[in-house]
């Protein structure tokens, strides 16, 4: 059954996960309007700096400032007390125009055979943990899940996937280290197709310094998967570490050049004041942010809902 709204527990988790971001943002915002009664050019200049230093990103910040300037031009005496409300409205409006639909739960589109997700992202962003949490969330709603450990260049990646498989109780297809990633993907797709899996999640190597090799490797993985599941992969999910701020933008740009990325997961938002990066990335890349990580527990990987996010971002 689909959910239209977050549960109370999910909302509380999201509020708590964004606490550092909110505190940092409102502290800066408070300094911007102190001693000011109306939103003037000086306030807008300082607000621009607040948004940029909150990792919203330059392009998205410019859009937000332009919108607020338009409102100031319309109402010459816009009170600084209203700035929080105006910001909230304009950021919500901006994100709602992105032509990306929010998920309402962890369910997946119906496809012919298993739904195949390729996971990409540099090492250290929480890629393997995201895979494990996704597997747990899918299994919790009754899906048959298979994991493929195709990041064979890093021993810890294979071991971590195996541990998650044991923890969640799902099969893991692996061939150890230094084996051909495409052969692992091939076996995972084959196993998924032959065993009526609902979803196959395949980890891939997190290397950006060899972009051509990365492109070739992903192309090879995609081609071997198609032998068993012709329409696969159905999704290429890029995992980004929200705590890295602007570095997450750079990674998103590089990966979208290297391969077709169809969705995003932004992790580690609970331990950082850089949660504004979600607003910028959602706006700039026009690729759906499907999941956000706001804590260490399995259930702290949430489906991303733009309006719920903005509501939590601006709630006090």
Image (cartoon, rainbow, N blue to C red):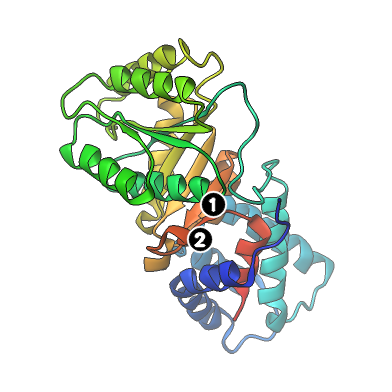
Near-viewer residue (110 or 32): 110
Residue at the limit of the structure toward the front, as seen here: 195
Please state which of residues 183 and 71 is positioned toward the viewer in this rendering: 183
Q: Position of residue 216 (x, y in %)?
A: 33, 16
What separation in Å lies between label 2 and label 1 (alpha carbons)?
Answer: 7 Å
The residue located at (69%, 59%) in the rendering is 92
Q: Are marks 2 and 1 in contact (CB under 8 Å)?
A: yes
Relative height, residue 151 to residue 19 (above, below): above
Q: Residue at point 36% right, 17% down? A: 186
Q: Secondary structure at mark 2?
A: loop
- Residue under numbered circle 1: 280
Residue 215 in view of the camera: no
Q: Quadrant of the C terminus?
A: bottom right
- Report which quarter residue 72 is drawn in: bottom right
Q: Can you identify the residue that label 2 sits on?
A: 276
In this rendered view, identify the residue nearer to me: 9 or 194.
194
The percent position of residue 212, horizontal first and vertical second, equals 31, 19
Judged left or right of residue 138, residue 75 is right
- Whether residue 112 is visible, yes or no, is yes
Residue at the image position 57 percent from the left and 38 percent from the top: 287
Q: Residues within 10 Å of mark 1 (few under 14, many from 20)?
A: many
Q: Residue 259 location, x and y as percent?
A: 44, 25
Crowdedness of circle 2 by 10 Å Cα count: few (<14), some, many (20+)? Answer: many
Disc count in the image? 2
Residue 201 picture quarter: top left
């Amino acid at each position: 059954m689909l959910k239209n709204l977050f549960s109370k527990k999910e909302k509380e988790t999201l509020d708590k996960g964004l606490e550092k971001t909110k505190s940092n943002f409102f502290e800066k915002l408070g300094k911007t309007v102190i001693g000011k009664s109306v939103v003037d050019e000086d306030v807008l200049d300082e607000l621009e700096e607040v948004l940029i230093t909150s990792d919203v990103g330059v392009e998205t910040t410019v859009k937000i400032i332009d919108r607020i300037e338009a409102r100031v031009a319309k109402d010459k005496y816009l009170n600084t007390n209203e700035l929080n409300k105006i910001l909230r409205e304009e950021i919500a409006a901006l994100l709602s125009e992105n032509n990306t639909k929010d998920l309402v739960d962890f369910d997946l589109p119906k496809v012919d055979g298993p739904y195949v997700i390729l996971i990409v992202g540099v090492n250290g962003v929480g890629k393997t943990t995201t895979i494990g949490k996704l597997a747990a969330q899918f299994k919790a709603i009754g899906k048959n899940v298979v994991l493929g450990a195709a990041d064979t260049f890093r021993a810890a990646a294979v071991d971590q996937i195996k541990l998650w498989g044991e923890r969640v109780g799902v099969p893991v297809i692996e061939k150890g280290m230094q084996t051909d990633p495409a052969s692992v993907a091939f076996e995972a797709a084959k196993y998924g197709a032959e065993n009526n899996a609902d979803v196959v999640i395949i980890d891939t190597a997190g290397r950006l310094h060899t972009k051509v090799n990365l492109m070739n490797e992903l192309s090879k993985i995609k081609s071997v998967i198609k032998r068993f599941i012709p329409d696969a992969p159905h999704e290429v999910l890029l995992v980004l570490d929200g705590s890295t701020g602007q570095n997450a933008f750079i990674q998103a740009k590089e990966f979208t050049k290297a391969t077709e990325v169809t969705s995003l997961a932004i992790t580690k938002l609970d331990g950082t004041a850089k949660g504004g990066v979600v607003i910028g990335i959602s706006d700039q890349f026009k690729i759906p942010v499907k999941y956000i990580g706001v804590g260490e527990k399995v259930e702290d990987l949430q489906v991303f809902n733009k309006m719920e996010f903005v509501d939590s971002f601006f709630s006090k």
